[in-house]
Image (cartoon, grey):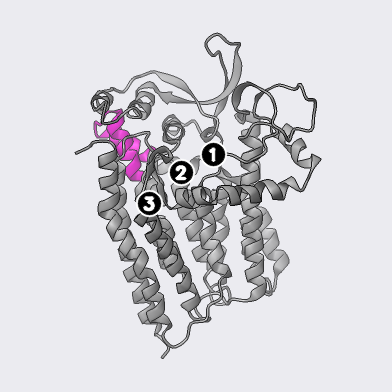
């Protein structure tokens, strides 16, 4: 028996309500229990968000003299001195130093702005920091001190994360379980409840993937929202840009050149942003003197003091096969770490989950994927093998692009392996991979799809208690 549209709409409403309640409760507790700065790279993201308070949209290059060394040029933003101290004041919080949080909470606002050196976040597009910036501003207006205002900023980021995630779950015509599971993962939710914009990038990717599930024949205009939404992702992380070509699907549909033209239009702003960043703030990382690694094809006695993308590019062009061997080697050698850090390694990858949590979320993701297979072929955009292959190729090339971007911009020249990629970088691909899964559901499709979401819902319910308790225990908060 074919389920009615009303029944399917009710299923979506229930799943959206569950998502909002579960992620909001768990996310709020994570936001207030996790010490400020105890999420990966959060102080640098706070600096970017705080700079928007006084209208600094772009970073700047400034001279900097390390102790005992010559002056160098570094990328930076300006930030209130009180906020800067509050953003790093709790990083030393531990069971052995319980007074750190108390002292940080008493720090006042100042009238002075200080330069904060940020190699990563200074180049990111500022739009996704606005919820955090607004939260800080509201907190200050309400009389909060800098540390309390930063917690308000976290709540702003969480509200944006939950709103975008709820839209994604509600919009998806199939694969809503995959989106629910992805955005409920401890890693994704921890990021969403912090200033680290990776949380919102994951949520926007989920929304973009959900929009592509909509039937382009019935709703041609709605599908085009994919382009401006995903543009926000690649404005901050250009290596994901190849996924913009998902807008070409279904490949068999007419007007391919018009779609390609629209892709070019929406792909232009991120390119312009990259050019601007390269001109005003993009800089190589200072590393100190070091000899290049074994893959360096140049002079043996060369010495480098920074990362060097052009030199790394020379490593790749000397043997183009390294594009495959280096990226595949990372997945093979570090696959376990990538999966683990994608599901959840909280803090600065220092807080592991229990083994059962990794197993449970792995099974939840697998069940959600099976739910896509159980969906009916008529649910949303039609599946065909050509679009499926195209999706897999784009995701595969994007994985290579992400890993090579890290190799070129982060690793030492001539390194024989790629260091730096973490599991959260790959969460953005899950909503697009589900588009490649064939839908074979029949008579009992609605029941099977609903059942496929149950493991993720159960894990999310457990995490309402487990994750806050884990962080409270880790930082001796009660």
Q: CA distance from mark 1 to mark 2?
A: 9 Å
Residue 460 on the magenta segment:
no
Return the residue at label 1. 124
Secondary structure beneath dot 1 equals loop
What residue appears at the point 63 percent right and 36 percent down from the top-left corner?
409
Q: Are marks 2 and 3 in contact (CB under 8 Å)?
A: no
Classify mark 3: residues with Cα within 10 Å, few (<14), some (14-19) or many (20+).
Answer: many
* Outermost residue to the bottom: 1
The quarter of the rendered structure image containing the N terminus is bottom left
Q: Nearer the viewer, mark 2 or mark 3?
A: 3
Q: Is residue 200 left or right of residue 396?
A: left
In the rendered image, the vertical position of residue 456 relative to residue 307, given as above or below: below
Q: Nearer the viewer, mark 1 or mark 3?
A: 3
Q: Are marks 1 and 2 in contact (CB under 8 Å)?
A: yes
Residue 132 spot, x, y in % from top left: 38, 40
| Residue stretch rendered in magenta on the structure | 133-156
Secondary structure beneath dot 3 equals helix
Q: Is residue 343 left or right of residue 35?
A: right
Q: CA distance from mark 2 to mark 3?
A: 15 Å
The quarter of the rendered structure image containing the C terminus is top left
Q: Nearer the viewer, residue 127 or 75?
A: 75
Name the mark on residue 197.
Answer: 2
Residue 457 spot, x, y in % from top left: 33, 64
Name the mark on residue 186.
Answer: 3
What residue appears at the point 46 percent right and 66 percent down from the top-left corner?
366
Q: Is residue 280 left or right of residue 440?
A: right
Report which quarter residue 458 is drawn in: bottom left
Q: Main secondary structure of the magenta part?
A: helix
* Outermost residue to the top: 68
């Amino acid at each position: 028996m074919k389920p009615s549209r009303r029944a399917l709409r009710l299923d979506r409403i229930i799943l959206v309500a569950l998502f909002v309640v579960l992620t909001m409760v768990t996310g709020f507790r994570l936001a207030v229990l996790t010490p400020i700065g105890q999420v990966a790279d959060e102080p640098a993201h706070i600096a970017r968000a705080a700079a928007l308070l006084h209208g600094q949209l772009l970073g700047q290059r400034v001279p900097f003299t390390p102790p005992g060394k010559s002056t160098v040029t570094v990328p930076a933003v300006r930030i209130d001195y009180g906020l800067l101290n509050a953003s790093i004041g709790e990083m030393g919080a531990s069971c052995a130093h319980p007074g750190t949080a108390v002292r940080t909470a008493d720090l006042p606002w100042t009238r002075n702005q200080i330069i904060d050196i940020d190699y990563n976040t200074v180049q990111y597009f500022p739009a996704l920091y606005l919820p955090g910036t607004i939260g800080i501003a509201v907190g200050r207006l309400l009389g909060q001190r800098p540390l309390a205002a930063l917690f308000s900023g976290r709540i702003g980021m969480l509200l944006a994360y939950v709103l975008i995630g709820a839209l994604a779950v509600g919009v998806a015509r199939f694969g809503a379980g995959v989106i629910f599971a992805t955005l409920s993962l401890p890693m994704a939710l921890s990021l969403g409840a912090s200033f680290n914009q990776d949380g919102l990038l994951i949520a926007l990717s989920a929304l973009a993937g959900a929009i592509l599930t909509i039937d382009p024949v019935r709703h041609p205009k709605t599908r085009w929202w994919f382009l401006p939404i995903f543009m926000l992702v690649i404005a901050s992380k250009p290596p994901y840009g190849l996924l913009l070509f998902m807008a070409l699907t279904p490949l068999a549909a007419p007007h391919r050149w018009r779609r390609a033209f629209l892709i070019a239009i929406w792909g232009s702003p991120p390119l312009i942003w990259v050019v601007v960043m390269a001109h005003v703030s993009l800089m190589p990382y200072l590393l100190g003197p070091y000899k290049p690694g074994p893959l360096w094809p140049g002079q043996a006695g060369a010495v480098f003091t920074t990362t060097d993308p052009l030199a790394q590019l020379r490593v790749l062009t000397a043997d183009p096969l390294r594009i495959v061997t280096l990226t595949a080697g990372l997945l093979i050698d570090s696959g376990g770490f990538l999966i683990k850090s994608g599901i959840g390694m909280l803090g600065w990858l220092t807080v592991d989950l229990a083994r059962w949590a990794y197993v449970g979320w792995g099974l939840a993701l697998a069940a959600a994927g099976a739910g896509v297979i159980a969906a009916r072929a008529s649910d949303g955009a039609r599946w065909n093998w050509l679009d499926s292959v195209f999706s897999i190729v784009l995701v595969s090339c994007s994985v290579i692009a992400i890993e090579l971007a890290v190799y070129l911009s982060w690793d030492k020249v001539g390194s024989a392996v790629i260091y730096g990629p973490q599991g959260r970088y790959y969460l953005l691909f899950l909503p697009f991979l589900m588009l490649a899964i064939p839908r074979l559901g029949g008579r009992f499709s609605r029941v099977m799809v609903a059942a496929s979401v149950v493991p993720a819902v159960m894990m999310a319910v457990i995490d309402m208690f487990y994750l806050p308790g884990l962080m409270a225990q880790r930082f001796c908060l009660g």
